[in-house]
């Protein structure tokens, strides 16, 4: 059975945020669901992917409730340069993904290189 905690977060303009903390089997089921991306990327049996973790949400504040429990269970996100290089190789030159899938991923990774895109240009 899970319980709800209410936390006042100053980063959220003094709003109170209900946070779920899960217990036992409920927590394990949730961790298993959130670990899908790890299982998917490891299903290719690329040795470069063994040490990575991509199950966490990107957050700018510390984690609370079940998000904290997930960090405790799996650790923070981590990605190695070798894993990144392998994934990029497969997206741009490999044969793991279909041509249509590779093109869709390449499109998602594309960005403009002009002054309007570059935020560092004054």
Image (cartoon, rainbow, N blue to C red):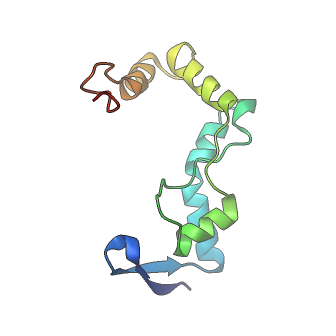
Residue at position x 68%, y 43% in the image: 52
Q: Is residue 53 above or below residue 84?
A: below
Kindly indicate the quadrant of the structure image that contains residue 116. Answer: top left
Residue at position x 44%, y 16% in the image: 99
Left or right of residue 10: residue 73: right
Q: Quadrant of the C terminus?
A: top left
Q: Quadrant of the N terminus?
A: bottom right
Residue at position x 52%, y 23% in the image: 97
Kindly indicate the quadrant of the structure image that contains residue 115. Answer: top left
Residue at position x 73%, y 42% in the image: 51
How many circles with numbers are drawn on the protein? 0
The x, y position of residue 30, in whole percent, is 56, 66
Q: Is residue 114 above or below residue 41?
A: above
The x, y position of residue 78, in whole percent, is 64, 45
Q: Residue furthest left?
A: 116
The x, y position of residue 118, in whole percent, is 32, 27
Q: Residue furthest front?
A: 122
Give whichever of 81, 24 is nearer the camera: 81
Q: Is residue 20 visible?
A: yes
């Amino acid at each position: 059975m899970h319980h709800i905690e209410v936390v006042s977060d100053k980063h959220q303009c003094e709003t109170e945020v209900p946070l779920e903390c899960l217990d036992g089997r409920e927590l394990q089921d949730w961790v298993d669901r959130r670990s899908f991306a790890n299982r998917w990327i490891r299903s290719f049996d690329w040795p470069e992917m063994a040490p990575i973790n991509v199950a966490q949400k990107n957050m700018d504040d510390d984690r609370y409730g079940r998000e904290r429990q997930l960090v405790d269970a799996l650790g923070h996100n981590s990605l190695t340069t070798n894993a990144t290089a392998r994934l990029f190789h497969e997206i741009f030159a490999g044969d793991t993904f279909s041509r249509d899938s590779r093109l869709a991923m390449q499109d998602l990774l594309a960005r403009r290189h002009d002054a309007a895109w570059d935020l560092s240009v004054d």
